Image (tube, helix red, strand yellow):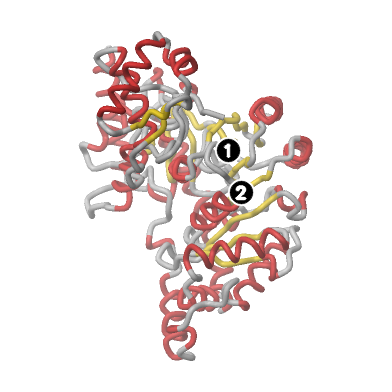
Amino acid sequence: MDAPFRNPPVAATRVGLVMAAVRSRIDARAIGRGAKLPSVRKFAEQLGVSKSTVVEGYDRLAAEGIVEARRGSGFYVATASPPLVLAAAPPSLNPGIDLAAIMRNALESRPEMLQPGAGWLPESWLPLESVERALRAVSRGPASAKLRYDPPRGLESLRRLIAARLTERGAPVDPAQVLLTDSATQGLDLAARFFLSPGDCVVIDDPHYFNIVQLLDVHRAKIVLAPFLPDGPDLAALESVFAEHRPRLYLTVAGPHNPTGAALSPSHAHRALQLAERHDVVILEDDIYCDFEPTPSPRLATFDGYDRVVQVGGYSKTVSAALRTGYIAARSDWADALVDLKLATSLGHSSLAANILYRVLTEGSYRRHIDALRPRLAEAIGLTIRRLKSLGVTPWIEPRGGMFLWAQLPDGLDAVDVAKAALEENVVFAPGRAFSPSLQWRDHMRFNVALSAEPRVFDSLDRAMKRAKSQGQ
């Protein structure tokens, strides 16, 4: 079935509109060489032009060698799709927001730059001494830990440890159902490769973790939003979306939710699983923030037992982003197939990183690190809330844990305008439109409380809001 051409590029003429719409879809790799273009009648209806306009547009594209006409059959793409460049692809969700640029700016930080909008802990909050001890221990260990490929599923001792931790949280899983990945993001990518074909529908939370849109765009998925509430997804909306769009996946972040800091309630978890079963939807649960919670909130995998829930996690947030080690936990037949897919795309996980992480997690200091981190984050949440309220910025909820605070700016200010003004002072905020195209969130920002200790953060926010307000009047 031909997918509709949404939001065609602006062109000077109607014929140009037709040509630009075809080119943009080829550039976005939505169609490739040999793909049949929509019929003249159908495309004319989609673009709101006459059939003769479509015929002329197709003929001009054929003259340029971009498409070819096949007598009695129609028009087909004649050129190969270009390499995927996300910045050049039409945005599927967030118009006016360059998500790739946000990622680049965040990762290419300068010493003078403050990043209250970033998604990680300060280096001083991470267990550097534990990592250094583990590095020294692994360096003195057998050569196989440093020089060989990892086993297909990953280091067995680390997988056993992860399986034990998942079982402690109420989701019993066999170590054979756990495979290591080069990050939680790679785990999400492998799951998307495994379950999705181009054009498949994926439901994500609104608001959502913004990088997931980039990832799903790579897989050419159709993205549909489901509102997220303080205790989980809006169940009525989720049921409606499942029934209308028949998605293959529902992708959600477990508590503390990114960006809102919310946590799933037991009743919402149970009902969401019922809806997924009724509509045959697989749930991909991102549990990267699990160790931040003082008291674990419900997990969909706990209620489901890994029947239709695939769980992804990792330790980049609590140990080190440099140790690119994540995991996937899934039912046995899916785990076996995911291992094969992992080998086909990366050959295997880093044995060196896995051995270092295993040392960190088992030497005893990790639990002490987490036990100290949670109250430190709770204190930072309270301090950030007080400072924001003094500026008229209102938290959506007061999270029970984690590092994110989702808050509303005063006077209907557009958070993008405020973020741009603050960037001139080397302060990087995360505007709401990066996490959702919904106008409901345009005046919201995500604050990382661990990176909001400097008073300059709030001084800059105050000036940026005043500047945005004066420019909007």
Counting residues from the start of the chain, the first of labels 2 and 1 encountered is 2
Q: Nearer the viewer, residue 202 or 394?
A: 202
Point out residue 442 in the picture as x, y percentages from the top left corner: 42, 25
Q: Give the label on residue 195, or none.
A: 2
Q: Nearer the viewer, residue 63 or 416?
A: 63
Label 2–label 1 contact, CB within 8 A? yes
**Residue at mark 2 to residue at mark 1: CA–CA distance:** 9 Å
Q: Neighbour class for label 2 at 10 Å: few (<14), some, many (≥20)?
A: few
Q: Please, is residue 430 above or below residue 113 in the view?
A: above
Q: In terms of secondary structure, where does tag 2 sit?
A: helix
Q: Is residue 432 left or right of residue 329?
A: left
Q: Is residue 153 left or right of residue 64?
A: right
Which residue carries the number 1 mark? 200
Q: Amino acid at mark 2?
A: Phe
The number of discs equals: 2
Which quadrant does the N terminus fall into?
top right
Q: Give the label on residue 129, or none.
A: none
Residue 371 shows up from this direction: no
Q: Based on the displayed image, in which of its 4 quarters is residue 416 positioned?
A: top left
Residue at 46% over, 80% down: 134
Q: Amino acid at mark 1?
A: Asp
Residue at 55% over, 49% down: 192
Residue at 21% over, 39% down: 425
Point out residue 437 in the picture as x, y percentages from the top left corner: 45, 27
Q: Nearer the viewer, residue 219 or 39?
A: 39
